[in-house]
Amino acid sequence: MPNGKSILLIVGGGIAAYKALELVRLARRKGIAVTPILTKAGAEFVTPLSLAGLAGAKVYDDLFSLTDEVEMGHIALSRSADLVVVVPATADLIAKMANGIANDMASVTLLATDKDIVIAPAMNVRMWHHPATQRNLETLRRDGVTIVGPATGAMACGEFGPGRLVEPPELLAAIEAKLISCVPKPMPGQALAGKHVLVTSGPTHEPIDPVRYIANRSSGKQGHAIAAAAAAAGARVTLISGPTSLADPAGVTTVHVTTARQMLAATEAALPADIAIFAAAVADWRVANAADEKLKKTAGSGSGAPALALTENPDILATVAHLKAGRPACVVGFAAETEHVIANATAKFRRKGCDLLVANDVSLTGSGIAGGVFGGDANAVHLVSASGVVSWPVMGKDEVAAKLIAHLAALDSGWA
């Protein structure tokens, strides 16, 4: 049973659109998450409010929505679910799919997706039998699209024949079968297709007492960008994130942790991986005996601040890099430095046993980046490896991520 799976449901414009609401209800009952896209024509038959209410999710309908494009974007949306389902698949939508026409949210998403597609046609019997429709359907079959139905029977127009939307329970059974059998399809040219990439990101919070903790200024922006770039390159990505304010990247399995020990446990659980990229800024120390109750300051006691006994946290990068069994073929570390960046990073590279170390200057003055690297949107890194040091200029963190993933994909295929 595909509990925990998700579908992207595109609702087309036809009288049968009302059955999409019942499909959503049945899918949710089976534990399948539904993200709806409502076409302009579909909105003539069902409302965004009813669709959102049953799905428990936002309804997407505007290709040119500034908010949606900033927060998710149609490309990310097209790859955010395990399966894309079109109900009802009208003659118009079928024609757009078969001929690569992309002029609205639904058709652009269908053209951009790398996931399997299931369509449930519904239209007038003469439209169904028209040679153009049959040619388009044959094209979709060759492209690997699963076609469910249509059923034969009386239609709202008064005619009789094939063209009725299959009933929601039958359609759900086909969707469940597809969710069980389908695997992600790499897009042509995806350099990391078939690879598992593990990424850590963000800070860790080490508790002093129930309300206070030791942490650092890492925002997680660089690590999250790397995870997104790896997914875009076709990899299966596991992101292990410390506490951040960032949204989980689309198409990525994200595990949320708080402490360094939790991050190590999650990392070990996520192995094996082909590439492991340790971008998280893990706290070096934790309080040896965190208090169970809030530490109180007693006014006028003169006792001063409580003494905090610190102990070292596990070294996640070194632990994975020195594994004798199950070590990722390529292990990448990060070094956030405030002085002697290259010298300190080179020493860390030799000490940790990784294959590549990405170093940056996180000081407010040395980085040359207004506002500094921590929390900002730009970075300037140095790649330290056995071959020497390569320095990259200041660029956006998304660009750094894309360039790093391209660099890893282009390395000697000995690790791949």
Image (cartoon, helix red, strand yellow):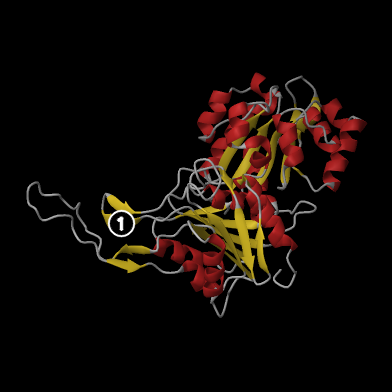
Extreme right residue here?
Answer: 131
Q: How many marks?
A: 1
> In the picture shown, does residue 143 fall above or below 68?
below
Q: Is residue 180 visible?
A: yes
| Residue at (76, 29) in percent of width and height | 90
Other-residue count near label 1 (Cα within 10 Å), few / some / many at <14 / 14–19 / ≥20:
many
> In the picture shown, does residue 141 fall above or below 286?
above
Q: Is residue 81 visible?
A: no
> In the picture shown, does residue 173 fall above or below 165?
below
Q: Which is more toward the observer, 176 or 82?
A: 82
Quarter placement of the C terminus:
bottom right
Place residue 137 in its image quadrant: top right
Left or right: 276 in relation to 146: left
Place residue 245 in its image quadrant: top left
Q: Position of residue 326 (x, y in %)?
A: 58, 75
Query: Which residue does the numbered mark 1 point to in the structure image?
Result: 207
Q: Which is more toward the observer, 29 or 223?
A: 223
| Residue at (78, 32) in percent of width and height | 102
Extreme left residue here?
Answer: 301
Which amino acid lies under the numbered mark 1 shown in the image of this protein? Pro
Q: Which is more toward the observer, 402 or 382?
A: 382
| Residue at (47, 67) in percent of width and height | 316
Quarter placement of the N terminus:
bottom right
> In the picture shown, does residue 411 fall above or below 167?
below
Q: Position of residue 239 (x, y in %)?
A: 54, 55
Callout 1: SS = strand
Left or right: 160 in relation to 223: right
Q: Position of residue 252 (x, y in %)?
A: 59, 51
